[in-house]
């Protein structure tokens, strides 16, 4: 029988793992390609902030929306462009899911910690931990935002070195900008009040097991230079590693394009749109070009897996300082506009060029995939539930199919939806009125729980406007069975709520 993502069965991997599709022919093809290559790859993750699914030219944006992205488009042509790549609804949950292979209901970062709020990644096993144990050099650069407490900082969760800031862009800038906060800027008392809040106002440098050392305070002029400084730090790291035998993992997270955008002066007004967000996209595209060129110049490109994405969809109430998604709603929601993000995977000679797939790929999939590519699949933890699916054969086999059957959507503490194939069953969502702004984590919209589930066909209805359930009751058991199994896994391996308890 021909493979079908809804009708075909999955294979169970054990009580602590998400079930997976197994495609024997593509597994064999991927294994043969890995054996012929014979080396463990370097891993470069480039993670943008609040960039929309459609911003890049390879996704239909680029020149058409006033911000050409030639370097990103070229990278997409060199590898696999994903049209159904999924983050979590906001920054910190997404980043923690990418590094742990676990959904927010398990790792506990249900929403971003704000202004020194306690809680973070402490206690989780990260991709950096696991790769470090496998002999990799691990480097984090740029935005962190997974806890400011010492135990949750990068140098204490698996990274050898960290150069970046611990929080989020607007927490450094908004209270300094008279356009957004005149009542703070023009009040000495309120300025001092903000300065006394318990969050780190500097970007920092730290080495494994050490205390962070302040590099400089992040005021608005400093903010505009951060992505340039971080790009230099990462390109220097890549050059330095060219002479080493150890493989490496570089986690490069940009400041852009999170509001408020203050691009480097050489990009100001450089985009056809003449807008700070679009100017910032030009800067980010240039950084991607420089990172890839450095890999090429140092002879490491053919042995480096590159994953480029965004941590969530664009912000809604900050338009036009956030941009384009063809889907419904925005950051902070489980409508497709909040969680379907650009996803490009490139590894010259290993991932075939000029590929495009709508196969499901979640941020949690990166960890088990990379551990397999690193030759240590058994190092994936078994003492906790891993939601990620190993996508090695999807990436490396010619015209490979995704190994993921279901994608589960969580909205802070609420189970929201599940997708399989082209269908999405939704139980809980947010309103998409940008005047409804919920406080926790800066999310737009208020939670809506439906008396009856809604079923959307994402191919016919990408805006999720027409519930199809009364005409498609035959699919009920597929989705209800998936939800039952997912909930059962939480009973076997209870999750935690580190940030976001109580919504």
Image: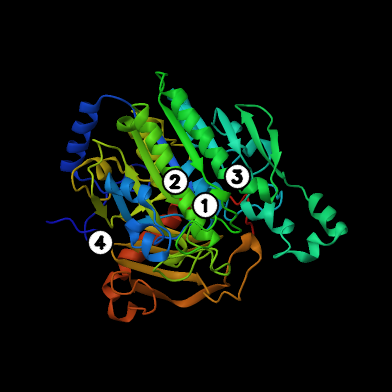
Q: Give me the residue at 28% from left, 45% from top.
A: 79
Which of the two labelled residues, at mark 1 and mark 3, occupies the earlier sequence position? 3
Which of the two labelled residues, at mark 1 and mark 4, occupies the earlier sequence position? 4
Instruction: Kindly report the distance in space between the C-alpha atoms of the residues bearing marks 2 and 3.
Output: 14 Å
Instruction: Kindly report the distance in space between the C-alpha atoms of the residues bearing marks 1 and 4.
Output: 46 Å
- Residues marked 2 and 1 touching at CB (< 8 Å): yes
- Residues marked 2 and 4 touching at CB (< 8 Å): no
Is residue 387 visible in the rendered structure shown here?
no
Q: Secondary structure at mark 4?
A: loop
Relative depth, front residue between 28 and 195 = 195
Query: Where is residue 208, by image quadrant?
Result: top right
Residue 286 shows which numbered tag? 2
Q: Secondary structure at mark 3?
A: loop
Q: Which residue is mark 1?
A: 267
Q: Which residue is mark 4?
A: 6
Name the side, left or right, on which 365 lies relative to 161.
Answer: left
Which of the two labelled residues, at mark 2 and mark 3, occupies the earlier sequence position? 3
Assign the N terminus to one quadrant of the image: bottom left
Q: Which residue is mark 3?
A: 225
Instruction: Kindly report the distance in space between the C-alpha atoms of the residues bearing marks 1 and 3.
Output: 11 Å
Q: Give me the residue at 46% from left, 31% from top.
A: 130
The crowding category of the residue bearing disc 2, from other C-alpha atoms within 10 Å (few below 14, some 14 to 19, many at least 20), is: some
């Amino acid at each position: 029988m021909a493979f079908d993502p809804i009708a075909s069965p999955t294979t169970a991997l054990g009580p602590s793992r998400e079930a997976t599709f197994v495609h024997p022919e593509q597994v064999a093809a991927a294994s043969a390609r890995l054996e012929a290559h014979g080396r463990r790859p370097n891993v470069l993750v480039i993670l943008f902030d609040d960039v929309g699914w459609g911003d890049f030219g390879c996704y239909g944006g680029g020149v058409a929306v006033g911000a050409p992205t030639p370097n990103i488009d070229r990278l997409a042509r060199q590898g696999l462009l994903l049209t159904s790549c999924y983050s979590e609804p906001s920054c910190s949950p997404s980043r923690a899911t990418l590094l742990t292979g676990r959904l927010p209901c398990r790792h506990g970062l249900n929403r971003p910690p704000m202004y020194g709020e306690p809680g973070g990644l402490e206690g989780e096993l990260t991709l950096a931990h696991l790769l470090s144990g496998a002999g990799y050099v691990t480097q984090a650069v740029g935005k962190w935002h997974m806890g400011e407490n010492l135990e949750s900082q990068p140098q204490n969760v698996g990274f050898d070195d960290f150069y970046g800031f611990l929080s989020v862009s607007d927490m450094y800038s908004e209270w300094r900008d008279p356009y957004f906060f005149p009542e703070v800027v023009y009040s000495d008392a309120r300025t001092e009040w903000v300065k006394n809040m318990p969050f780190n106002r500097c970007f920092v440098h730290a080495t494994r097991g050490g205390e962070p050392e302040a590099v400089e305070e992040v005021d608005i002029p400093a903010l505009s230079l951060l992505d340039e400084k971080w790009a230099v730090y990462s390109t220097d790291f890549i050059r330095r590693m060219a002479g080493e035998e150890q493989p490496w993992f570089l986690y490069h997270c940009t400041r852009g394009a999170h509001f408020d955008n203050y691009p480097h002066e050489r990009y100001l007004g450089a985009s056809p749109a003449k807008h700070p967000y679009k100017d910032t996209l030009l800067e980010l595209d240039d950084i991607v070009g420089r990172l890839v060129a450095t890999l090429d110049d140092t002879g490491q490109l053919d042995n480096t897996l590159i994953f480029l994405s965004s941590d969530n969809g664009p912000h809604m109430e900050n338009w036009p300082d956030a941009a384009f998604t063809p889907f419904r709603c925005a950051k902070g929601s489980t409508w497709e506009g909040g969680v379907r993000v650009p996803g490009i995977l490139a590894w010259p000679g290993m991932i075939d060029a000029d590929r495009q797939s709508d196969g499901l790929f979640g941020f949690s999939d990166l960890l088990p995939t990379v551990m397999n590519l690193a030759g240590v699949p058994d190092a994936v933890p078994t003492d906790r539930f891993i939601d990620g699916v190993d996508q090695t054969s999807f990436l490396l086999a010619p015209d490979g199919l995704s190994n993921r059957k279901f994608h589960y959507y969580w909205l802070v503490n609420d189970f929201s939806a599940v997708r399989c194939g082209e269908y999405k069953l939704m139980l809980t969502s947010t309103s998409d009125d940008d005047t409804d702004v919920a406080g926790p984590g800066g999310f737009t919209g208020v939670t809506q729980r439906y008396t009856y589930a809604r079923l959307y066909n994402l191919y016919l209805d990408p805006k999720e406007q027409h519930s199809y359930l009364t005409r498609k009751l035959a699919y009920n058991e597929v989705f209800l069975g998936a939800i039952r199994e997912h909930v059962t896994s939480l009973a076997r391996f209870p999750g935690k709520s580190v940030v976001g308890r109580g919504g």
